[in-house]
């Protein structure tokens, strides 16, 4: 069985462990699920440049909420101040968030800025692109740019200046419309690791000149800005031979090409026939007004006599390359006896140079999203700062992976449908095989008969495959959350609650089936109406204008 259906089953089975990990750990520093409205907690910038409207919206096809970029071709800015600044210097720090590019991304950003403490008097509503940050991380795509940025702003201890250091060769942005989770792991050993969907895509060292541009540690020496090249410094490796003389027989005026005097006009050449003639079948349009449109001329066509014969019009001898052509004479080059090499200014100690054993990160005091994008539909979700990589893994497994697997299943179904009936049937068989395996999971035994009823109904109505998947997931998650968070409540109410969940799922499937049918009828009626009421295309004039 192929990976996608099995992946869905694996995601369901591992979810229990992930949720338990989330409950047991206190290494979570900050987490935003957007389950509740962001208003009052996240502050939208009041700067005039940022006209984009943020919305609290569900991810397409899910009941999970996120922070939505709702309009095209707008600038957006929103910020969340943390309760306390987060130090990036002590041990491992993990930055993680989800984005879903529901309408794709042609030109725009979907990254986060982790702001350092701002100047006294700064207000969140003043957040803009000038607000200083410690780290910028996330997708950015436009034209030739296609990367998952990781940018560190580091303060030079010698000059006090903040410098942007870009991770070299960052990974590309996934080219689809699915949910993806981006993770940056800042390790105590000076390394940074970039993960996409839990898979490591890039690793670099903060102190390596090969991994960041410009390097975090400046060069020890720099070119002396006051050093000047001497006037007599000769950088020419070769020079024209001053003793060379142009040969007497060198004709610089000879043309590159000459007529081929040996060529003869082909027999049957039609000297008096033009290459193009008026189209004899063309007629002047009835609405042509000579005063307004000018004198009408028939369009031209290729002369059929020319196509049948060797050629038409005045015959001319073809040109050929002139064997006597030599072009402009130049003296041959010789080694320059005065050559001194390419001049470079002397090196002097770099006044900005410093040495450190590890980066001097500024703390993170707020999380901001400040982007410009031509596409809408960008959804941010599950923003996390943690001290332990295991916490980020648990959140990916519990929050992101179930959504991603459902989206992949839907994508596979759409691809199978596009491939035709055979492809769809094969896909549905794999899906139902996995659903039957889910029904056999031991802790679902009490509800197995109900789940089997849903699956069997789906097999009888194959067009409801996606609805069946969602229904089984509803039952699964309801029972799972009951087991994990339910405590010691009485069993009988729980049974009624789960029975209601199953019934609701069955009802959802029935409604989905009728909805698809009604939608199809509406489309047919709309199509017929469009055909009946379609306007005739505008008439095109044949022929050319002649200006009076």
Image (tube, rainbow, N blue to C red):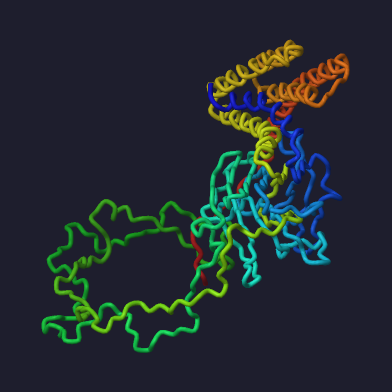
Front in this rendered view, residue 444 or 90? 90
The answer, for residue 396, to whether it is visible in the render is yes
The residue at 71%/21% (across/down) is 472
Percent of width and height locating residue 425: 57, 20
Up-down: is 276 above or below 159? above
Compared to residue 195, the image places residue 10 above or below, namely above
Q: Where, by quadrant of the figure, is residue 165 drawn?
A: bottom right
Q: Where residue 513 sits: x, y (%)?
A: 73, 22
Q: Residue at horizontal 19%, vertical 68%? A: 321
Left or right side of 485 for 382: left
The x, y position of residue 474, in whole percent, is 75, 24
Q: Is residue 145 left or right of residue 493?
A: left
Q: Is 213 left, or right, of 405 in this rendering?
A: left
* Residue found 26% across the figure and 78% down from its top: 238
Query: Which of the two residues, 548 or 134, is positioned nearer the viewer here?
Result: 134
Q: Identify the residue shown where x is 57% and y is 67%.
A: 354
């Amino acid at each position: 069985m192929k990976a996608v259906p099995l992946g869905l089953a694996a995601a369901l089975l591992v979810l229990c462990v992930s949720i338990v990990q989330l409950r047991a750990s206190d290494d979570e520093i900050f987490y935003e699920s957007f389950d509740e409205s962001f208003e009052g907690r996240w502050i939208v910038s009041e700067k005039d440049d940022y006209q984009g409207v943020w919305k609290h919206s569900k991810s397409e096809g899910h009941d999970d909420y996120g922070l939505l970029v709702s309009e095209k071709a707008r600038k957006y800015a929103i910020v969340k101040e943390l309760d306390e600044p987060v130090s990036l210097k002590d041990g491992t720090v993990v930055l993680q968030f989800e984005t879903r590019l529901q309408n794709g991304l042609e030109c725009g950003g979907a990254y986060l800025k982790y702001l350092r403490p701002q100047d006294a008097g700064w207000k969140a509503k003043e957040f803009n692109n000038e607000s200083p940050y410690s780290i910028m991380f996330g997708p950015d795509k436009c034209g030739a740019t296609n990367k998952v940025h990781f940018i560190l702003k580091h303060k030079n201890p010698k000059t006090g200046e903040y410098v942007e250091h870009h991770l070299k060769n960052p990974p590309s942005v996934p080219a689809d419309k699915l949910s993806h989770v981006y993770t940056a792991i800042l390790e105590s050993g000076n390394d940074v690791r970039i993960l996409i969907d839990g898979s490591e895509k890039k690793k670099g060292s903060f102190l390596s000149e090969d991994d960041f541009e410009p390097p975090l540690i400046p060069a020890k020496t720099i070119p002396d800005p006051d050093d000047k090249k001497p006037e007599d410094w000769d950088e020419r490796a070769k020079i024209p031979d001053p003793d060379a003389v142009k040969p007497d027989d060198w004709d610089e005026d000879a043309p590159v090409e000459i007529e081929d005097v040996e060529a003869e006009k082909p027999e049957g050449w039609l000297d008096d026939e033009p290459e193009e003639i008026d189209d004899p079948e063309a007629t002047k349009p009835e609405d042509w007004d000579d005063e307004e449109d000018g004198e009408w001329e028939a369009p031209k066509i290729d002369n059929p006599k020319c196509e049948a014969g060797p050629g038409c019009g005045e015959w001319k001898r073809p040109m050929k390359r002139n064997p006597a052509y030599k072009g402009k004479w130049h003296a041959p080059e010789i080694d320059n006896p005065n050559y001194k090499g390419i001049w470079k200014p002397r090196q002097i100690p770099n006044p900005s140079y410093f040495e450190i054993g590890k980066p001097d990160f500024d703390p993170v005091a707020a999380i901001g999203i400040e982007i410009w994008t031509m596409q809408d539909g960008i959804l941010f979700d599950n923003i996390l700062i943690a001290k332990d990589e295991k916490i980020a893994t648990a959140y990916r497994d519990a929050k992101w992976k179930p959504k991603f697997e459902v989206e992949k299943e839907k994508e596979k179904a759409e691809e199978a449908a596009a491939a035709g009936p055979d492809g769809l049937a094969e896909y549905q068989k794999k899906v139902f095989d996995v659903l039957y395996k889910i029904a056999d999971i031991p802790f679902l035994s009490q509800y197995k008969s109900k789940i089997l009823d849903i699956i069997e109904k789906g097999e009888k109505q194959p067009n409801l495959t996606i609805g069946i998947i969602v229904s089984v997931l509803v039952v699964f998650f309801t029972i799972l959350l009951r087991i994990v968070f339910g405590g010691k409540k009485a069993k009988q109410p729980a049974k009624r609650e789960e029975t209601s969940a199953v019934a609701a799922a069955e009802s959802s499937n029935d409604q989905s089936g009728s909805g698809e049918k009604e939608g199809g009828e509406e489309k047919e009626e709309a199509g017929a109406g469009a055909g009946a009421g379609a306007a005739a295309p505008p008439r095109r004039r044949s022929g050319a204008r002649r200006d009076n």
